[in-house]
Image (cartoon, rainbow, N blue to C red):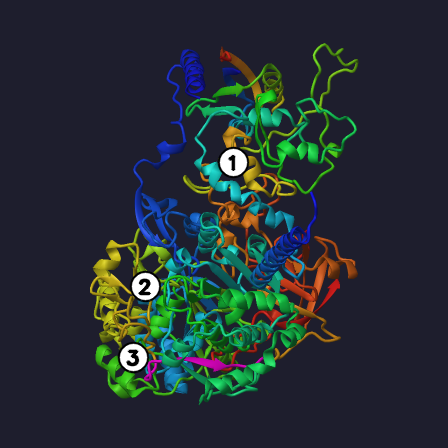
Amino acid sequence: MKLTLRRRLILIGCASALMLATISVIGESVRASWKEAKLSGEPSQEQPSIPVEGGVFRLIQKALAYKNAPETDAGRQLNGYYGRRAFPGAPPVIPHPTFDERSIGGKACMGCHAEGGFVPFLKAYAPVTPHPEMSNCKQCHASGHQEPGRTPSPFASSRFDPLPPPAIQGAALPGAPPPIPHSLDMRSNCLACHAGPGAPKQIRTSHPERVNCRQCHVQNVPGEPAAPFFQNRGSEPSWEP
Amino acid sequence: MAVKSYLVYPRTGLKIELITQLADLAGCEVTPAENRDVVILVTETSDQLEENRLEQRILSLPALESLNLVCGLEEHKE
Amino acid sequence: MERRQLLKQMAASSAFASAQAVFPGITFAAPKSNASLEGVAWKKAPCRFCGTGCGLLVGIKGSKAVAVKGDALSPVNKGLCCVKGYHAILALYGSDRLTKALVRKNGKLSPAPMAEALDLVANRMKETIAKYGKDAVAIYGSGQWTVPDGYAAAKFFKGGIGTNNVEANARLCMASAVTGFMSSFGLDEPMGCYEDIDHADVFVLWGNNMAEMHPVLFSRLLDQRMNRPGVKIIDLATRTTRTSLASDRLMLFHPQTDLALANAIAYEIIRNGWHNKTFLEKHVSFWTGKTNIGYGLEDKFAFEDKGEQVSFQRFQQLLEEYTPEKVEQISGVPVKDIRFLASLYGDPARKVTSFWCMGVNQHTRGTWMNNLIYNIHLLTGKISTPGNSPFSLTGQPSACGTVREVGTLTNRLPHGVVSNEADRKMAAGIWKVPVDRIPAMPTYHTVEMFRALDRGDIRFLWIQVTNPMVSMPKLRRYRDAANKEDRFIVVSDVYPTPTTDIADVVLPSAMWIEREGMFGNSERRTQHWEAMLPPPGEAMSDTWQLIEIARRMGHGQLFPWTKENHVEEIYKEYSKFHSGAKHEMGSYEDLKKHSGVIWPFVNGKETKWRYHAKYDPAAKGDSFDFYGFPDHKARVWFRPYEPAPEVPDKAYPFWLNTGRVVEHWHTGSMTRRIPVLDKAMPKAYVELHPDDAKALAIRDGDRVRLTSRRGSLVLAASIDKRGRPAKGMVFVPFFDEGILINELTLDSFCPISKEPDYKKCAVKVEKA
């Protein structure tokens, strides 16, 4: 094509128009973002985190979804839950094959265990981790998956006798909120284990939409010393750890 | 998945302790007799491994005198 | 599931059959759970604890309370409670419940028949008045007094004996809110109601740990945020708490600098033109008051504010000191965050509700702080309409209903103040006493009342439903005062406490649902409950104790009623004080029928939003009408920043902050006797910032010694458990009578409200 002057001018005109358009669009969006920044903006102060207190509020955006999901008996059961733990409070073994022996876990595990869901090839609901801030999963969670045809262990079986798991339904009065019978270290996110089909059926809450769990449920850890309250005297109490 | 029921006898004088200890175990439902030192226990477990474990646990309870199986029922998977 | 249940039933029946065969005649306990709720009658009552005023249904079986559930018909909590509410009935059944009167003989409290104890109290009162005058006797009551309790006390002391020595512990919790309302609006109590929560887009929490202290209301905030995306919760605090972690943004400020922050927000609003000019012109006047007003540390400290009306321009000029840049320097809140918060208030498209409680009220400039939050809402016109609400939350279940509305304070009457002749005439008329019986001069506010006890100006003090020997600031002085010679202390309570320890006579009180009563909560809702259980032993309601004493003192004609009808009659007489569209109370029958009635209750309708003609029949015109003042305008007060009286220095380098936890109510005398709550939170502790702890080589659980200029304590350290104080601050909850943190606090108070500041004094921290 011959580039006559007219054609050149048209080309230049189009290019300029395009440039002007780009500039004005960018300018508009910058202005809009300034406006947004004035009204939103990131916090400038450190937003401290107290895991044992703040954990209860994680996943609250899913609370309504849990509430609206149909009631089901499917999903995990409490017996199976304890079956995967050497003793109550122990980290559960991984009951399914993992794919990368060298991986520490991290994103590979979080793909299913950050928010749970149904895993078709395992035909099971993935439990949600109550401590997603920890990414070195294999530090604590060992493989419990038995390959079929594996040779039996040459060692004698164990005589270890674990403590019984805490009783559930320990409410003080009929209809009262049962207290939390377990420690909250790494288990401060209630919805992870008490809501949704990934939660063991026996401890699934009837009211996941009430997200301020610790308003009603306080900790009563069984076995922890609790001398009944007597009146104290004197300003220097005798020391008790 | 197995459901079993037992008659459970406590050591002398330890009925309350036995009830408390049994009630603490997952998968156990306890109904004490009012006028005898015996307790009815109904257990449910999801597989053989768990069933064995639970039985071992019950047998090792300090307040237990004897455990007598009455009835065992299996729930077959669909 | 059903199949499994069937299998279990089959297995169980086999076992039962076997048992029958082996043991003929054997019987088994009925299965637990729902069967145990048979035969339970559910009766409504407001919760015994905080100022939220949740509606409860108490399960009564025979003469025992056996269960609690939330009242689904109550608009306050809609069927939900908190852990204290759910276990409230357990507070009735502590094993050391006071059931007999106790009289101190030879230094020891020993049981006595109730009649004898009441005679002793009345005689001692007569003797004291004869020897020292009417103003030597006093009563110190409570925001946990029922409405009839408070009315009987006010009528007996002010209209019978003729002394204004009537005070209540609400002076320690809500006085600044009252003086804030009175100076900004001319009338007490919030103009909005809890329904504001359903409309607001932004919630700003000023220095209150709402997730633990008003948990049910906080859950309503969380609910709104879940259902309406865009709702924001901002936590303004001196300490990181559960509330901070649930909020969208935490802004930590240095103690006392909330004064400067509020002014900076006002400055930004005006600078950006976000103030509502028409609203200000029509409905707001501008004022300045005295400055450098002191801290109340001296005995007989007196202060009267003097207001001067100024122009808007002058107000704007005074705010120049409070630019965000300058305020960042003293408060620690970055300029960006101040501007952000101001923009939320200033955005005309956003409805803003502010909540506050003890952080603002228990403050040596508490009245000013209340004024400053109202300023922000008045400048933007965000008030008196659904969702736009500066909402002062109440701590106690009836600080509003009894102390503020019945007027059980030295300067108050059920309607108005003692210094107003018309108000005295009205009281004298309704009470049928001579007008000059009611003194025109207020006598002592709470701190001064205990100082008067110390000096000997008060020789007889009756304490009802409160525990000052744990809750008074600078506790040692006031405990020593109560223990002095020739100071007769009568205590009405339900359990032995450090206050009954110093009593000369202890009267056992009936508790909550053991007698009929009414409470009034933060949102002006009066709630009634019937007597559901017999009180144990000789326990007697506080109202009836007052009536018994009044009768023995020759003032029986003030209470010409029987045990059966006195509560209804008292309420009917009391309601006369509040007739009119500005404060009309629901009738006795209305209260019995409904889960509470908000006042004003005019022509069968609750006034949910006051001062706006669309919602308030007492308002004239077609929009706002602040009828508390003669010019029908609300007042914006310029209030400066002034520092706290005792700030950290080299000798005492930490701030001491005190407060509460969700498990325990105040001084713990009730909740620590509830096993679930005692086990969940058995002992007080001191919270430290992890960096401070590290510098002092203190680990979680270590012994720590806290020392102030007034006392010293040893207690365990808590690091990043329930809360994290700011660096340079420690926090101690005050529920533990074995760790009397108030021995360390300072009895400074707001000169206008006389409310002490429990949040700021200086301590040193050492590993013990």
Give the distance between the C-alpha atoms of the residues marked 1 and 3, in whole angstroms: 61 Å
Q: Indicate which disc residue C61 carries.
A: none
Q: Reply yes or no: does residue C6 show up in magenta.
A: no
Towards the viewer: A30 or C180: A30
Mark 3 residue type: Gly
- Find numbered disc 2 in the image and state the secondary structure of the residue it sits on: loop
Marks 1 and 3 on same chain: no
Indicate the quadrant containing the N terminus of chain C: top left, top right, bottom left or bottom right: top left
Q: Which chain carries label 2?
A: C
Q: Position of residue C60 (x, y in %)?
A: 33, 45
Q: Is residue C675 visible?
A: yes
For disc 2, the marked residue is C608
Residue C591 falls left or right of residue A145? left
Towards the viewer: C365 or C249: C249
Q: Indicate which disc residue A195 carries.
A: 1
Residue C276 appears in which quarter of the rendering? Answer: bottom left
Marks 1 and 2 on same chain: no
Q: Where is residue A51 in the image (x, y as percent from the top left)?
A: 64, 48
Against A104, residue B53 (above or below) is above
**For the magenta stretch, what is the residue range?**
C629-641
- Label 2 packing within 10 angstroms: few (<14), some (14-19), many (20+): many
- Find numbered disc 3 in the image and state the secondary structure of the residue it sits on: helix
